[in-house]
Amino acid sequence: MRSVVLASESPRRRELMNISGIPFSCASPKIEEHLDLSNGIEEGVMKLAKQKAEAVYESHGGNLVIGADTIVVIGDEILGKPKDSDDARRMLKLLSGKTHKVITGVALVNQQVHEAFYEVTNVTFCELSDQEIDDYIKSREHYDKAGSYAIQGKGMMFVKKIEGDYANVVGLPMCRLVHELRKYTEI
């Protein structure tokens, strides 16, 4: 089997792919990321994942390319990556004691395949004290993480309950991805 190409430089997504045993390489999509919400959040993350996969496919023709985009949603607010420590503090206070959604859009693209899907996982945080939030921010783990936390790191201490695919919260819904890949490759 030819290896698939992961259109991401995310260390978390690479780790998930390594664990799966699926042969893959990585390539960074050279696009300006813009989440188009005109057709809803789920359609928006799938569209962005597809744009990433298509951008990489142009330079890796023949291989099946996986694109992905993960967002955190609480109520009507989308929490992306924090701009700074104050923004991270605001997000973590917002998530404290509440349930939020982690939505990952995934696209599979090559000459024959143009498929996209999304996965939703509900995550409930325990109540966080200001001190817990400040200590977490000092760890710098919030940096470059949607919603300002990493469930696979120290952020796991905030999680009271999870409903759905854990790997989705890390950044790639592996159970669904593997089933979809089996339609097009021998893994």
Image: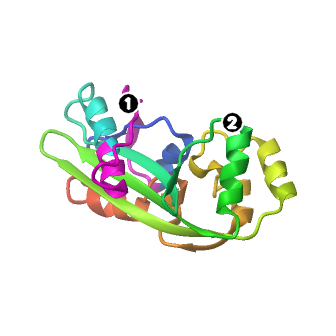
Instruction: Examine the rendered structure and indicate whether residue 68 appears above or below residue 7.
Output: below
Secondary element at tag 1: loop
Classified by dominant secondary structure, the portion drawn in magenta counts as loop
Instruction: Examine the rendered structure and indicate whether residue 16 appears above or below residue 55.
Output: below
Q: Amino acid at mark 1?
A: Pro
Q: Which residue is mark 2?
A: 84
Count the labels in the image. 2
In the rendered image, which quarter contains the N terminus? top left
Residue 73 in percent (x, y) is at 50, 58
Say if the magenta span includes residue 42: yes
Residue 6 in percent (x, y) is at 38, 40
Q: Give me the C-alpha separation between circle 1 and circle 2.
A: 24 Å
Secondary element at tag 2: loop
> At 44% from the left edge and 58% from the top edge, which residue is drawn?
103
Q: Amino acid at mark 2?
A: Asp
The answer to which of marks 1 and 2 sits earlier in the sequence is 1
> At 69% from the left edge and 70% from the top edge, which residue is drawn?
97
Q: Nearer the viewer, residue 76 or 16?
A: 76
Say if the magenta span includes residue 128: no
Q: Is residue 187 visible?
A: no
Q: Is mark 1 in CB contact (under 8 Å) with mark 2?
A: no
Q: Which residue is mark 1?
A: 29
Residue 15 in percent (x, y) is at 53, 47
Q: Nearer the viewer, residue 50 or 174?
A: 50
The quadrant holding residue 153 is bottom right
In the rendered image, which quarter contains the C terminus? bottom left
Q: Is residue 147 left or right of residue 69?
A: right
Residue 134 in percent (x, y) is at 83, 49
The quadrant holding residue 180 is bottom left
Instruction: Examine the rendered structure and indicate whether residue 159 appears above or below residue 18.
Output: below
Residue range highlighted in magenta: 20-47
